[in-house]
Amino acid sequence: MSSLLSKHESVYRTIRERILNGGYEPGERLVLSTIARDLDVSPVPVREAIRRLEAEDLVTFERNVGARVNTLDDEAWEQLVEMLALLDGYAMRRAQCRITLAALGEAQRLNDALRAHAGGPADQHGEVMALHRLFHRTLYAAGDNRYLIETLDSAWDRIDASRVLASRWPAHRLASAVNEHDELLRMLRSGHVDPSELERCTRQHSLNAIIAIRGRGDTGRLDRVVPALNP
Amino acid sequence: MSSLLSKHESVYRTIRERILNGGYEPGERLVLSTIARDLDVSPVPVREAIRRLEAEDLVTFERNVGARVNTLDDEAWEQLVEMLALLDGYAMRRAQCRITLAALGEAQRLNDALRAHAGGPADQHGEVMALHRLFHRTLYAAGDNRYLIETLDSAWDRIDASRVLASRWPAHRLASAVNEHDELLRMLRSGHVDPSELERCTRQHSLNAIIAIRGRGDTGRLDRVVPALNP
DNA sequence: GACAGTCGGATCGTATACGATCCTTCGAAA
DNA sequence: TTTCGAAGGATCGTATACGATCCGACTGTC
């Protein structure tokens, strides 16, 4: 007789879930004994769960003090997104010669669903973020490199946990992003696009999120170099 | 009265060290109670250490069975190096406009030390690998993006742990790598190199390691496209 | 000889207990 | 009023204990 998940595993998933969708805020303290009582387990499996979250850079643990949900200042957030842009762009390059028609169709459906939200009520931010992440995930999963996918997922997790996009993504950026997605899908389908060019455009699409959050405006275009983050 | 490190922390470092430099082989079992006795602590901090190593993808833990040092098959190894090439190339691009003369000099010294090993006895493989990794680390640390650096370090760790380079790096590859390093340093110093070009060449340098291990030969050149891994 | 079933040792999983550390609070002296 | 220091509570850190699970070996049957 055994449950499917060990206690440590289910505790891990529960805490992680709460961090990612705002149940625990950035900076919030995670007290072992409190969580243990809350989830009806002893502190031991909770400690193990927190160690894993620490290794994933979702929480910070200070000896004899305890754990807190990580916060991201503006500079850290931009550096993280910059890495995500890099990985996403390359994953797209790999996807170009591997993606199936089914995956392309799925991505198109997700982007159409996103378009339906553009200009809509701002209180569906959670759904929009989930759709947007799923759109990208569908594409980079087609790139079929385990390490790229894991690192991308991990980066997205930390971005979600930071609540930066959830609280500061400008509403008008969504429409631009949807158009850029369409453009990327066109490039994928065409079959005649230089891989380097596809990678460059995909990277630029992600970097545009930084520019939008910085409030420098938003080109919504991939076909020219926007103010470069790195000359 | 307290020691500098908690037991869990020092256990973590000890195990990690052994995994990285071959004290524990890929595939080897890590038995909690044995390690605990060996390091003179109770099994509890050992479990925490193993959880962290699991989250770092250095070991795999199976419920009710135990932990093993991770193994990398050829395909996984190539995918990991491919990601490393991507990150390293971009870190170099960032470094181009940030690196100091001191860091450039340090990198040159490390590469000169590497050159001194080329053609030398093959039993100094450990030192060569350490120098090589340090050379790259000096450069991408200059890129000054915390996430790039952490992800690169983590990827190098897993590559070291796999023992693939330690056991299969062809001796002749070292001389080529040293020349490529020189070429990259020249590009960094010149100040007139297109950032995209620098990134491309740096990426290619890392990808050449895959080609060398595959045994397809080794161009030792960065100025033309070698048989592409991704068209 | 092949196979199923049972037993036992090895190992993991978690609860509990208790000492160690930190941080806040409160009070007394300057 | 400010500062120093002691006391107490909150919380962490680790050892120990013991039940649960897995796996290999042994035995008996066909």
Image (cartoon, coloured by chain):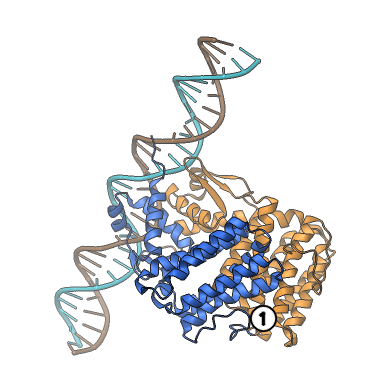
Chain colours: A orange, B blue, C brown, D cyan
Locate the C terminus of chain B and report the quarter of the image it occupies: bottom right
Location of residue A121 by image quarter = bottom right
Type of amino acid under label 1? Ala
Looking at the image, residue A83 lies above or below residue B37:
below
Q: Residue at x 58, y 58 (%)?
A: B103
| Residue B218 seen in the figure | yes
Q: Position of residue B36 (x, y in %)?
A: 31, 53
Looking at the image, residue A104 lies above or below residue A49:
below
Looking at the image, residue A186 lies above or below residue A150:
below
| Pointer 1 residue | A103
Q: Nearer the viewer, residue B43 or B103?
A: B103
For this view, does A36 lie left or right of residue B37? right
Location of residue A83 by image quarter = bottom right
Q: Position of residue B109 (x, y in %)?
A: 51, 62
Which chain contains the residue that carries disc 1?
A: A
Q: Residue at x 49, y 87 (%)?
A: B216
* Numbered label tally: 1
Location of residue B118 by image quarter = bottom left
Q: Position of residue A220 (x, y in %)?
A: 82, 68
Q: Nearer the viewer, residue B124 or A165?
A: B124
For this view, does A24 lie left or right of residue B160? right
Q: Position of residue B156 (x, y in %)?
A: 49, 66
